[in-house]
Amino acid sequence: MAKTTPRKILSLLLGFFMTAFMTKVEAQIVIGTPNLQFSQACANETFNSFTVDFIFNPASGVLPSNQFIVELSDAEGNFDEPEIVYMSNPGEINSSPASVSFALPTTTAGEGYRVKIRSTEPEASSTPSESFSAYYKLQDSPFTINDLIPTGSYCPGGSYLLTIDNPGSPGNDSPLNYPSLTFNWFKEVGATGSVMVAQGETFSVSEPGVYFVETNYGTCTSDSFSNRVTITEGEIQDDVSATIVSSEGNPFCATNGPTELSTVEGDSYQWFREGSMIPGATEQVFVTDISGLYSVVVSFGSCQATGIIELDTGDFTSEVDVPASNMLEEGDTLIVTVTTDAVNPQFEWTLNGETIPGATQSTLSVTEFGEYRVYITQTSECVVTREHFFAVEEFINPFPEVNNIPNLISPNGDGINDTWIIPIDYVSGTNTEVIIISSNGETVLSTKDYLNNWPENQPTLSSVNEVYYYMIIPPDKAPKKGSITIVK
């Protein structure tokens, strides 16, 4: 057996480290700066694909499991928290140069984005690309301002508030439905030019001119722009208008809280609802959660402006076609129907606090006695629930058909023989006089309008059986007499 010397051991260790070093060197690549195949990235729902080319060297340095990744910076070009917008399949890209396409996130909006290319095996990263503008156009269609009214005017020394309609006329895709968007207001200059004059969802105009607004997509062209509105300065005698804006839009869902109605800035204010002055509503902003026609008069000293808005809180109306109290004879059926203008309504019916199984329609067939409620829920747009109550009691005929005059009753509240029921020939409407006298000669009842209800509302009876005497005197027949025993 050959002897292992220190020289041999040193040679083996050196060979091992050289092999490891060479393997590590061979597993390194360099990725070139990405070459953008676009000047700006303007995406929308129908187009969102942008190509970038890059080189890497040596091509043999990528492992079969390697993935190339495209990272997108923030709008200022920082890669502190980059967003991955493309990742290749393992081993998919193994030759250089390479070309990949990526899609913008829907939150993209800015002028200073950059991309980097990164590999996973081996780990390597390119320098950032040149900066570019990038916007995902969430809303990319024309919209309306000023309720599509083409003109407006303001009092001398005052202003006119232009607003983006939310939602505005039917079919108007209001950009206010997309909270991340911002807006640029423009004033036309000359026949074809315009200058940006403000940013925001509203613009207070204090100079005559033609104005419009565009969704801020930077240098990207877009169809997200408004109609033009011509604003003039009125004279003292002119009928000048003031804009009213609902902070939560119109319609809005009042169940989520009230909205703020605001108007242009003036010297004083007075708000009205349905033409009636609202006491104490004398500020520039009025808070409400009630539907209706609101107006405001804004005073500018020598001139007044009036604004109007038809506010819709997203509520609905409903009613049932029965009164709160109903009588039903045993074996009969009462049909109850709800009418409502709720959007996609759902119905729930309850009896004495318990849900009636299967009762989910707008109509209910009632055959049982008790307390009913129906809950109507609007399930679309603004989710609101309303309820209606009605009671159904058993109908007891106070004038049933009986042949004989009873001489025995038992008023114990069991619903059987509780009152003195006599033939219908002698009850209310026949002009028959009914007299009842106690055993000690006291008249306890004397009426020509008997309702088959004695001894209802009589003083407390004694615990022993009592005997009363009656006299029935019809107008055209012989009187009838007899006794009544009250059994306890």
Image (tube, grey):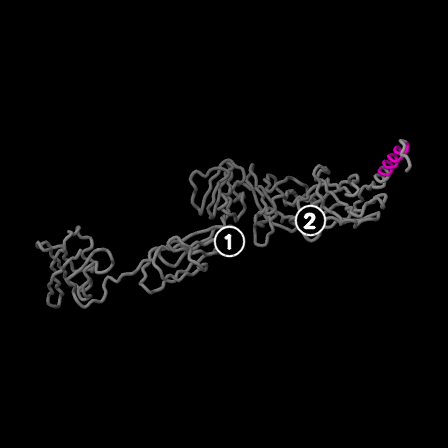
Q: Is residue 9 magenta?
A: yes
Front position among marks 2 and 1:
1
Rendered position, 16 above or below 430: above
Q: Which one is in front, 45 or 458?
A: 458
| Residue located 23% across and 55% down the image | 413
Q: Is residue 202 magenta?
A: no
| Residue 337 x, y percent position in the rendering | 41, 60
| Marks 2/1: CA–CA distance | 35 Å
Query: What secondary structure is the stretch in magenta mostly built from?
Result: helix
Q: Which one is in front, 475 or 250?
A: 475
| Residue 211 x, y percent position in the rendering | 63, 44
Q: Amino acid at mark 1?
A: Thr
Q: Quadrant of residue 28?
A: top right
Q: Amino acid at mark 2?
A: Ser
Using a 10 Å C-alpha cutoff, classify the residue at mark 2 as few (fewer than 14 neighbours), some (14 to 19) or many (20 or more).
some
| Residue located 29% across and 61% down the image | 395
Question: In the drawing, what numbered circle is on residue 222?
Answer: 2
The residue wearing badge 1 is: 379
Please state the extent of the stretch shown in magenta in the rendering: 7-20
| Secondary structure under the numbered disc 2 in the rendered image | loop
| Residue 207 x, y percent position in the rendering | 61, 39
Residue 240 can be seen in this image: no
